Image (tube, rainbow, N blue to C red):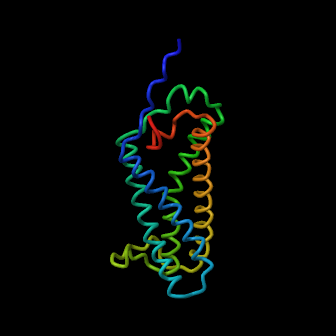
Amino acid sequence: MTLPAPPLSRYHPVAMALHWLLGLALVGLFAVGLYMVDLPFSPQRLKLYNWHKWAGVVVLALSFLRLGWRWWQPPPALPAAIAQAMPAWQRLAHHGTHLGLYLAFFAVPLLGWAYSSAAGFPVVLFGVWPLPDLVAAEPALAEALKPWHGWAAYALAGLVVLHVAGALKHAWVDRDGLLARMGLGRA
């Protein structure tokens, strides 16, 4: 007789809320970023650039909040049965993707903020609160930082795709209920 598997431990509701909020914000920011760069110079383009910068600062703040929460309230361990069933390369991909995501959560907005500062365009949060420049205005530095912000954003998008693909594999192929830990399904 086989005993039923113990229920999966869910993430704390705060961790789940930060996960989904940050995920939606990143998808929205990436989509707006792709759209706005091809617009001709116009009030609409300026409006989208400002919104993109505000949202980037909010993502940066959420990332600090999420990292602080993770430090204060560590996530539940990957269930032993699931961890043992995963080949070593999948465990490495699991941990590497999460580490890469956290690094990119900070790198992308900081590179964008530094680029904006170097280009001489201040970040004024919600059009009300001017934020300090990260670097002095310097056109050559702005030109150097601009592609790095884009590359980092594409790297973040790639990591998000890997993360979602891994989650879907657990849901549709392994059918191990792992997504329930993040609020999707029964734990």
**Foreground residue among 106 and 10:** 10
Left/right of residue 143 with respect to residue 177 in the rendered view: right
Identify the residue at horizontal 62%, vertical 41% (top origin): 169
Residue 3 at x, y percent in the picture = 49, 16
Residue 81 at x, y percent in the picture = 54, 25
Toward the bottom, the furthest residue is: 42
Identify the residue at horizontal 61%, vertical 72% (top origin): 144
Task: Judge whether 162 appears above or below 106 on screen.
Answer: above
Task: Judge whether 121 appears above or below 3 on screen.
Answer: below
Residue 157 at x, y percent in the picture = 59, 58
Task: Judge whether 18 appears above or below 182 on screen.
Answer: below
Identify the residue at horizontal 36%, vertical 45% (top origin): 13
Residue 138 at x, y percent in the picture = 53, 79
Q: Quadrant of residue 181?
A: top left
Task: Judge whether 43 appears above or below 19 on screen.
Answer: below
Instruction: Count every numbered label the image shows and give the total.
Output: 0
Toward the top, the furthest residue is: 1
Quadrant of the image for the C terminus? top left
Identify the residue at horizontal 41%, vertical 37% (top origin): 10
**Foreground residue among 105 and 26:** 26
